[in-house]
Image: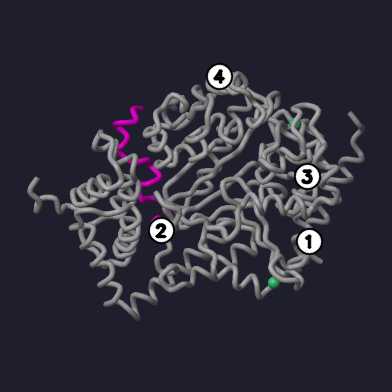
């Protein structure tokens, strides 16, 4: 369990704030969170966002010194440079730093699988794969919110889709 | 489209029309996209930036949207023009202040703005007056589709659209709504709203003027999560939350009117009085007073003034707009005088003045 970043009690509130593209997360216990929320002006940070971005990366990575040396084979940016700028160098960086970025993405977004819009040129197979992922996500939400009727319907739909896929010959 | 002529007008999104426009100033959706075959801008040199701009400029200029798009090479505009576009929310502050080849395509109604070489290669933005997120999405989605006919965007099956900053990856979408919440701010109920937003991973930001202090009781609500849920789910969630905040603001307004009508009427009338008679005024004070007056109009406490006028004044009293309207460079103190004069004119009290 994470500790409160102001005292040592367990953190119960996870506040992620974004300003001009920089993310910064605060992990606070109930008491510190109350204090923080009543003091903070909207849009104004009590701490430097760059520092918080650093903290967030540091907290999600163990051997930071080794990791800092990693570099992207395509654009040459090092992980250390990414940490200090908060910007990646090229699309391939997501692959080059995959192990380091995944926990960070999980931290920021709570998820690591895209289910939104697909480029028009995406193959049919990936489209169906996305549909399945979306349905499974909806099923999870339905179960969490105890909407059992909806959950049952979704389960049927998922099963139908899975069967349809497996019956089709591979292309 | 001529920037000097624009100073006298306002974009469609400020017209104060559209659903819930007494509380919702504007709805906005932006998408971040990058070309698959180029590095992100942090690793692009001057030649690379120029190449990206020339590659994107053509497909953008020929898009069938919003009448005709006008393209501006932002790097060729002077600082005042860039500031002017920032004030109109047609480019971001970051885009105004960066260096190197970059540009923006702006729709005739100012609902559409397409920035090349911002933090990402492409930032598409659609703005609308009032609470109109579905309309924003329909338009921006079709612009995105149309661009895809010409270029290939960086995309991964797992992570979706790849962006320079990991906070935007996935959908690359930022859905935001600008709300005017004077009653929630006055009663400090807004604190509860902030707390609720934090728990739901939604961001709230104040509207800024020249300084860094939030002012005028304007708050922008937006999503932070871009990876995981679909665009529609992100939009629906924000719609639901904003809907609740609108109801909350209305309820508190109604209570205020019932309990403190006289005090409220006094506050609103004083604000209106100062705006109509001040000889020098800062943009912070202007925002603050306009906010009061705007609420007064909605509650029927102010006669003879309409919402669109207050909306326009928020933009037109900002530094670059004032200087464009006067067609001269003005220092801060001179701007305060020019601002007061302009407000008196717009509020119909200039005839008492000898020039
Ligand atoms: Zn604590
Ligand atoms: Zn790279």
Numbered disc in front, either 4 or 3: 3
Which quadrant holds residue B13?
Answer: top left
Q: Residue at x 85, y 51 (%)?
A: A62
Numbered disc in front, either 1 or 3: 3
Q: Residue at x 9, y 45 (%)?
A: B355
Pinpoint the chain carrying mark 3: A
Question: The magenta stretch spans which residues?
Answer: B1-23
> For mark 1, what is the residue?
A151
Disc 2 secondary structure class: strand
Disc 4 secondary structure class: helix
Whether residue A47 is in magenta: the answer is: no
Number of numbered discs overlaid on the protein picture: 4
Pinpoint the chain carrying mark 1: A
Q: Would you call the spot at circle 4 few (<14 residues within 10 Å), some (14-19), or many (20 or more)?
A: some
Q: Quadrant of ligand 2?
A: top right
Q: Nearer the viewer, residue A52 or B310?
A: A52
Residue B29 x %, y %: 54, 44
In this view, the residue farthest toward the front is A65
Q: Are marks 4 and 1 in contact (CB under 8 Å)?
A: no
Whether residue B3 is in magenta: the answer is: yes
Which quadrant holds residue B140?
Answer: top right
> For mark 3, what is the residue?
A101
Mark 4 vs mark 1: tell me if same chain: no
> For mark 2, what is the residue?
B215
Q: Residue at x 48, y 49 (%)?
A: B27
Q: CA distance from mark 4 to mark 1?
A: 50 Å
Pinpoint the chain carrying mark 4: B
Cβ(mark 1) to ligand 1 < 8 Å? Answer: no
Residue A141 x %, y %: 75, 60
Q: Nearer the viewer, residue B236 or B183?
A: B183
């Amino acid at each position: 369990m994470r500790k409160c970043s102001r005292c040592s009690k367990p953190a119960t509130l996870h506040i992620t704030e974004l300003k001009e593209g920089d993310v910064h997360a605060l992990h606070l216990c109930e008491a510190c969170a109350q204090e923080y929320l009543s003091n903070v002006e909207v849009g104004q940070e009590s701490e430097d966002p760059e520092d918080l971005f650093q903290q967030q990366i540091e907290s999600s990575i163990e051997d930071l010194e080794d990791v800092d040396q990693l570099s992207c084979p395509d654009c040459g940016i090092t992980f250390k440079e990414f940490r200090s700028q908060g910007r990646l160098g090229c699309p391939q960086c997501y692959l080059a730093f995959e192990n380091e970025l995944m926990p960070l993405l999980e931290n920021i977004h709570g998820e690591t699988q895209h289910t939104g819009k697909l480029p028009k040129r995406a193959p049919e197979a990936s489209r169906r794969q996305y549909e399945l992922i979306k349905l499974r996500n909806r099923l999870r939400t339905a179960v969490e919110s105890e909407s059992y009727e909806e959950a049952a319907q979704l389960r049927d739909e998922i099963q139908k889709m899975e069967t349809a896929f497996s019956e089709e010959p591979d292309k | 489209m001529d920037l000097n002529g624009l100073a006298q007008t306002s974009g469609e999104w400020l017209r104060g029309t559209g659903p819930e426009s007494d509380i919702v100033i504007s709805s906005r959706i932006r998408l971040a996209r990058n070309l698959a075959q180029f590095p992100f801008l942090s690793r692009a040199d001057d030649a690379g930036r120029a190449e990206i701009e020339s590659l994107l400029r053509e497909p953008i200029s020929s898009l069938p949207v919003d009448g005709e798009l006008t393209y501006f090479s932002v790097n060729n505009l002077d600082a005042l023009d860039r500031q002017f576009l920032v004030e109109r929310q047609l480019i971001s502050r970051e885009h105004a202040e960066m260096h190197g080849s970059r540009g923006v395509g702006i729709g005739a109604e100012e609902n559409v703005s397409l920035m090349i070489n911002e933090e990402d290669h492409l930032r598409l933005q659609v703005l609308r007056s009032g609470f109109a997120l579905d309309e924003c999405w329909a338009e921006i989605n079709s612009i995105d589709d149309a661009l895809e006919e010409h270029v290939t965007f960086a995309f991964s099956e797992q992570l979706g659209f790849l962006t320079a900053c990991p906070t935007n990856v996935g959908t690359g979408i930022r859905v935001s709504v600008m709300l005017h919440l004077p009653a929630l701010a006055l009663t400090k109920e807004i604190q509860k709203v902030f707390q609720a937003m934090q728990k739901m991973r939604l961001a709230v930001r104040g509207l800024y003027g020249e300084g860094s202090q939030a002012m005028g009781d304007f708050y922008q609500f937006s999503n932070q999560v871009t990876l995981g849920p679909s665009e529609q789910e992100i939009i629906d969630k924000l719609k639901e939350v904003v809907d609740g905040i609108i109801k909350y603001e209305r309820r508190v307004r109604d209570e205020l009117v019932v309990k403190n009508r006289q005090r409220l009427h006094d506050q609103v009338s004083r604000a209106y009085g100062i705006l109509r008679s001040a000889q020098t005024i800062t943009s912070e004070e202007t925002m603050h007073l306009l906010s009061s007056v705007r609420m007064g109009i909605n509650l029927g406490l102010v006669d003879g003034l309409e919402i669109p006028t207050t909306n326009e004044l928020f933009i037109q009293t900002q530094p670059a707009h004032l200087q464009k309207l006067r067609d001269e460079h003005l220092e801060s103190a001179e701007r305060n005088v020019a601002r007061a004069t302009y407000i008196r004119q717009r509020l119909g009290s200039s005839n008492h003045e000898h020039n």
